[in-house]
Amino acid sequence: MTRVQGKVVVGNGGRILIGPRVKIRAVHVPVELGSLVGGTLSIGEGTFINSGTSICAQESVTIGRNVAIGNYSLIMDSDFHSVGDHTQWPQALPVVIEDDVWLAARVTVLKGVRIGRGAVVAAGAVVTRDVAPYTVVGGVPARFIRRIDTDGAARSADGADGASSVAPAVVAAAVRE
């Protein structure tokens, strides 16, 4: 059963598919879910979406199972207008967020991005390119910070043990088995 707390604003000109056990917490600020004509927004089982999040699919946004989406995040597969001519709609490119991903607060995911299984995206990051599975990325634009081994240990780019600099909760959220 999907659970909703608060207000969800839905604009559905295409298809919106919501899996079982999805939780939407929109108590302070509404969550916006949109699918334009011909677009598909798919949200997988057990995913959590926090207040103020906006997700829109002009073509395709696919969110996997057990994904945690922090408050005020923005996920979209289109720029919605061209820089030179705001009346022109540019090409949409699919967004895929694989299973067990954690998007912290105020993350922006732009068109054409795939975020790999178990990845963690730090608060405020702008994701403009693909994120490898079991990695931590952050910044504007988002860049690789460290790898998360499937044993739960975080390792920096040089392979050194970096677990002491990464909160255990970050690692635990990224590696759900």
Image (cartoon, rainbow, N blue to C red):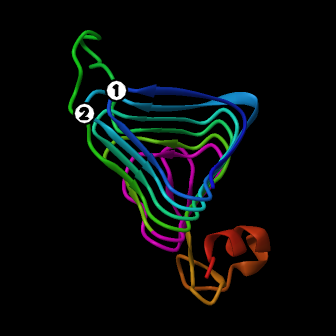
Q: Is residue 131 left or right of residue 136?
A: left
Residue at the spot of label 1: 13
Secondary structure under badge 2? loop
Can residue 167 be seen?
no
Q: Amino acid at mark 1?
A: Gly
Q: Is residue 65 left or right of residue 164?
A: left
How many neighbours does mark 1 have within 10 angstroms: few (below 14), some (14-19), or many (20 or more)?
some
Question: Within the image, what quadrant is residue 38 found in?
Answer: top left
Residue 22, numbered circle: none
The C terminus sits in image quarter: bottom right
How many neighbours does mark 2 have within 10 angstroms: few (below 14), some (14-19), or many (20 or more)?
few
Residue 24 location (% of width, % of height)? 66, 44
Determine whether 85 is above or below 59 in the image: above
Residue 172 location (% of width, % of height)? 71, 75
Q: Do tag 1 and tag 2 residues touch (Cβ < 8 Å)?
A: yes
Find the magenta span and give its range. 117-145
Residue at the spot of label 2: 38
The N terminus sits in image quarter: bottom right
Secondary structure under badge 1? loop
Q: Amino acid at mark 2?
A: Gly
Q: Name which residue lies at 27% across and 38% down.
A: 59
Determine whether 66 is above or below 11 in the image: below
